[in-house]
Image (cartoon, rainbow, N blue to C red):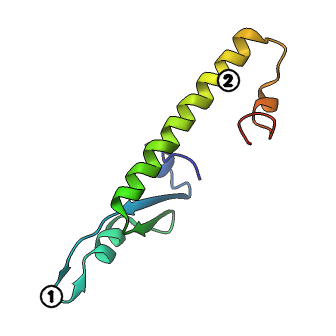
Amino acid sequence: MGANVANEVAKGQIRESALASSFNTVDEIDMNAPTRQVFDSSTFRVQHVKDVVGAEVSGTLKNIVALLSVGLKEIYKELFDVVRDDTFLESCGMAD
């Protein structure tokens, strides 16, 4: 799934997100599960990831790639005005 937009979440559209945390156990309770459950619902699924650094790096790289793809799409439009938008998303373009 893509980015979680507040109005889509508010409308109850089904969304998914990752919560990266590595809390210590308190009184023999894994605090990661209750923290995830605060946000988890039937329309907003929250997955727990213990690798906090890995989640941060992955999210950063994903956002960089997204920005680059938008930039490349704009370059395509400026240089080649006959190129269709959907071609850009095929395996010959950014889907590769």
Disc 2: which residue: 73
In the rendered image, residue 94, in percent from the top left (x then y), is placed at 71, 36
Query: Would you call the spot at circle 2 few (<14 residues within 10 Å), some (14-19), or many (20 or more)?
Result: some
- Residue 20 horizontal side relative to residue 68, left or right: left
In the picture shown, does residue 26 fall above or below 64? below
Type of residue at label 1?
Asp
Q: Quadrant of residue 66?
A: top right
In 3D space, how far apart are the residues under numbered discs 1 and 2 (Cα atoms)? 53 Å
Q: Secondary structure at mark 1?
A: loop
The answer to whether residue 95 is left or right of residue 17 is right
Q: Nearer the viewer, mark 1 or mark 2?
A: 2
Query: Which numbered dot is residue 27?
Result: 1
Q: How far across and down, in percent of the image, does residue 45 sit?
A: 48, 65
Q: Position of residue 49 (x, y in %)?
A: 41, 67
Residue 47's disc number: none
Q: Is residue 24 above or below residue 28?
A: above
Q: How many marks?
A: 2
Asked if residue 23 lies left or right of residue 53, the reply is: left
Q: Are marks 1 and 2 in contact (CB under 8 Å)?
A: no
Q: Residues within 10 Å of mark 1 (few under 14, many from 20)?
A: few
